[in-house]
Image: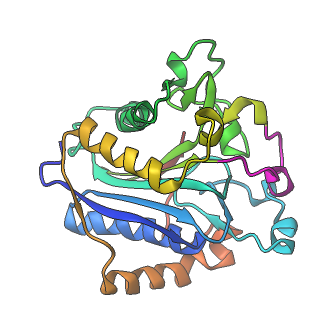
C-alpha cells in the first residue's frame, strides 16, 4: 500500500472556511498528482460544519450568528458537528492505494478506519467498530447531529460512539476526514436542532480521565497510520502557491452563503457519504 509514501501536512489550526477549502484543494491535488496526503488540523475559531446535503434548517443559524459561530458546509455527507476542542484528520488516496478496488463504500470505511482503532489502542483505550461492540444497537440511524447517528463502522469506546468520519468519492479517489473530540462542547443543543443524545457518545478527555491535547493524540494517529498501512510519511507543509489556490476556493465557495446555506454551486455533484 502507498508505494510512493504519503505526504504529511502537520497539525495546524485554521478557520472553518479555510479548513474546508484546504480539504477540497487536497482532493483536487490528488487528482493531478496521484500523491496520497494525510493532514491533521483543528478549528479556530470554533465552528459548525454541516453535511453536504444536510438541510440548513437543522441548524439554528440565528443563534450561530448571534454568538459569532461560523457555519460551513462540508464536501462530505453526514450530520452537523460542533468543532471546538478536537483533532481533525483528512486523508486523500485512491482505491488502488489501499487495495480497495472491489470494496463497497462501507467496506472501505472498515479498511481505512483501522488506523483509528490502532490510534486508540496506542492511547491505552479499548475501541471497536460499532458492529463488533458488545450491546451495539441498530445501525443506519440518521441524526442532524453527527455524534448521535449510528453506523456499522462508527468507532466506539465502552459501547459509546466517539467522533465521526465521512467520505467523498471522485472517480476512484477516496477523500475521508474525521473528527476526534477531546471534550464535550456543552452547548451544541443551542446551535443544532434535534436530539443530541449526550449519553450515546463520548470524548477523549472522559475516557482517558485527563486532559488530552490535539498534538498528543495526533502523534499517536501518525504512529498508528504508518504501522497499519506499512508506509512512510514525508512532511511537506502547504506551499505558497498552494495557499493561493486555497484562498480562491475559500472565497469562491466556502465563505459564500450560496454554498453554506443553500448547498449549491454550479459544478458540484452529489458524491459523498457520511459515517
Which image quarter: residue 251? Answer: bottom right
Residue extending farthest to the left is: 3
Q: Where is residue 242 in the image (x, y as percent from the top left)?
A: 34, 80
Which image quarter: residue 239? Answer: bottom left
Q: Position of residue 269 (x, y in %)?
A: 49, 60
Q: In this view, does 242 lie to the left or right of 199?
A: left
Residue shown at 25%/38% (left/top)?
227
Residue shown at 69%/76% (left/top)?
257
**Is residue 189 one of those drawn in magenta?**
yes
In the rendered picture of this protein, how many numbered marks are placed on residues? 0
The answer to whether residue 100 shows anywhere in this view is no
**Is residue 263 one of those drawn in magenta?**
no
Between 108 and 229, which is closer to the camera in this rendering?
229
Q: Is residue 68 left or right of residue 209?
A: right
The correct choice, above or below, for 61 with respect to 80 in the image is below
The correct choice, above or below, for 122 with respect to 11 in the image is above
Q: Position of residue 195 (x, y in %)?
A: 82, 39
Q: Where is residue 18 in the image (x, y as percent from the top left)?
A: 52, 74
User: What's drawn in magenta, residue-wise?
Assistant: 183-196
Amino acid at each position: 500500500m502507498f508505494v510512493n509514501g504519503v505526504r504529511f501536512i502537520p497539525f495546524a489550526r485554521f478557520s472553518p472556511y479555510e479548513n474546508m477549502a484546504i480539504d477540497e484543494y487536497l482532493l483536487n491535488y490528488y487528482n493531478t498528482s496521484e500523491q496520497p496526503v494525510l493532514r491533521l488540523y483543528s478549528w479556530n475559531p470554533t465552528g459548525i460544519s454541516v453535511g453536504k446535503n444536510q438541510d440548513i434548517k437543522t441548524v439554528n443559524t440565528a443563534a450561530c450568528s448571534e454568538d459569532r459561530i461560523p457555519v460551513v458546509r462540508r464536501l462530505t455527507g453526514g450530520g452537523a458537528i460542533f468543532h471546538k476542542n478536537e483533532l481533525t484528520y483528512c486523508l486523500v488516496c485512491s482505491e488502488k492505494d489501499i487495495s480497495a478496488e472491489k470494496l463497497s463504500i462501507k467496506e472501505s470505511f472498515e479498511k481505512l478506519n483501522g488506523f483509528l482503532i490502532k490510534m486508540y489502542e496506542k492511547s491505552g483505550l479499548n475501541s471497536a467498530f460499532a458492529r463488533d461492540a458488545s450491546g451495539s444497537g441498530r445501525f443506519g440511524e440518521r441524526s442532524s447531529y453527527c455524534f448521535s447517528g449510528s453506523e456499522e463502522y462508527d468507532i466506539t469506546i465502552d459501547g459509546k460512539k466517539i467522533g465521526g468520519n465521512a467520505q467523498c468519492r471522485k472517480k476512484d479517489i477516496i477523500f475521508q476526514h474525521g473528527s476526534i473530540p477531546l471534550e464535550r462542547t456543552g452547548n451544541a443543543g443551542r446551535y443544532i436542532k434535534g436530539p443530541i443524545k449526550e449519553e450515546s457518545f463520548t470524548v477523549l478527555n472522559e475516557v482517558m480521565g485527563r486532559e488530552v491535547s490535539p498534538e498528543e493524540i495526533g502523534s499517536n494517529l501518525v504512529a498508528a497510520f504508518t504501522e497499519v498501512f506499512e508506509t512512510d510519511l514525508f512532511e511537506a507543509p502547504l506551499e505558497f502557491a498552494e495557499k493561493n489556490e486555497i484562498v480562491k476556493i475559500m472565497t469562491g465557495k466556502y465563505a459564500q452563503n450560496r454554498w453554506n446555506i443553500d448547498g449549491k454551486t454550479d459544478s458540484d455533484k452529489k458524491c459523498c457519504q457520511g459515517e
